[in-house]
Image: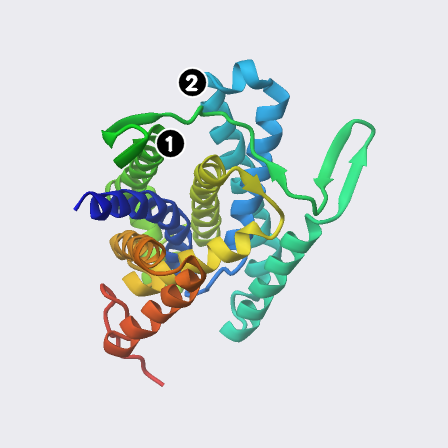
Amino acid sequence: MAELVQHIINGVAAGTIYALVALGYTMVYGVLKLINFAHGDVMMVGCYAGYASAHTMGREHSTSFLGVTVVFLVAMGMCALIGFLVERFAYRPLREKPRLVALITAIGVSFAISYGFQLKLGVGALTILPGASPRAFPEVITPSDWLVVGDPSYPDIVLRNTQVISVLIAVALMAALQVLVFRSRFGVAMRAVSFDHRTSALMGIPVDRVIALTFMLGSALAAGAGILYAIKDTRIEPLMGTQVGLKAFVAAVIGGIGHVPGALVGALLLGLVEEFVVGYGSSTWRDAVAFGFLIVVLLFKPEGLFGRVTAEKV
């Protein structure tokens, strides 16, 4: 029983990180019907922005509450800017083109960001691009065990402060998103654009601004997920966003792409499935089972767990 509880704790902590990234996929798809495959790479940029800000402040300041807040805000601000630039210069010119064109462009943007960050470029002491070498993310939150059940040497259940903080931050960000989408004028505009952007424009809604802000918001959430992921795993590299982005996309599809609560449920399910595979099977099977889980869900629910089948005129 204790082992089961431990796996649930680990699975939920991992699932909340996937959920923040999955929400970005869901928001963009809901508004544009576009799969932004560069989203995981934007998360990677947030990790490096957080890495740079933590190093600039130094260990003494970056480990304080204010320092950790600054790390998150810098990363989220940088990724919001990246999201705006990607939407403005890569996707907006293709908005009226066939969806396949935008999809291929999204893959190209993903490769451009991930492999571009493998270049090493700097001006004097200023590093612009970090290079391909992995880096250890600064210990902005000192790991400690908040709850230990059983023998301290071989505990049955361990609840770490990083897991609790990760879940609390993720839940707070998702709650803020829920309020923004369903309790604000911007949320009303975003839902109107997702229904029909041409009609929304005729009704006076600034469609381009709404879409740009949606990209920025999703990218900022990805940055928050990236910092939480880096705090947990400590190792960051230019290609880290590819795997995390794919897992988050799987979570979004499982929940029903375009459905915000579905993205959360899908991510939690994926995190639990991965943890149970590692705990009761082999870690080498983790990725295979995760994608196999996606196939099983789509066989019985092609629209995802919370998605709805919609008729489309041709």
Residue that mark 1 sits on: 162
- Crowd tier of the residue under label 1, counting other residues whose Cα lies within 10 Å: few below 14, some 14–19, many 20 or above: some
- Crowd tier of the residue under label 2, counting other residues whose Cα lies within 10 Å: few below 14, some 14–19, many 20 or above: few
Q: Is residue 20 left or right of residue 268?
A: right
81 to 86, vertically: above or below: above
Q: Residue at the top extreme? A: 60
Asked whether residue 37 appears in the rendered view, the answer is yes
Task: Answer with mark 2 or mark 1, whichever residue precedes in sequence.
Answer: 2
**Distance from the alpha carbon under mark 2 to that under mark 1:** 14 Å
Query: What residue do we see at 29% from left, 53% from top?
Result: 272
- Tag of residue 55: none
Query: What residue do we see at 28% from left, 61% from top?
Result: 255
Asked whether residue 181 appears in the rendered view, the answer is no
Q: Is residue 120 left or right of residue 92?
A: right
256 to 187, vertically: above or below: below
- The answer to which image quadrant residue 145 occupies is top left
Q: Nearer the viewer, residue 278 or 253?
A: 278
Residue 221 horizontal/vertical position (percent): 42, 42
Residue 266 horizontal/vertical position (percent): 29, 58
145 to 44, vertically: above or below: above
Query: If the image is split into quadrants, where does the C terminus sit?
Result: bottom left
Residue 98 horizontal/vertical position (percent): 52, 75
Q: Is residue 238 left or right of residue 181?
A: right
Give the colouring mode of the picture.
rainbow
Query: What residue do we see at 46% from left, 16% from top?
Result: 64
Q: Secondary structure at mark 1?
A: helix
Residue that mark 2 sits on: 65
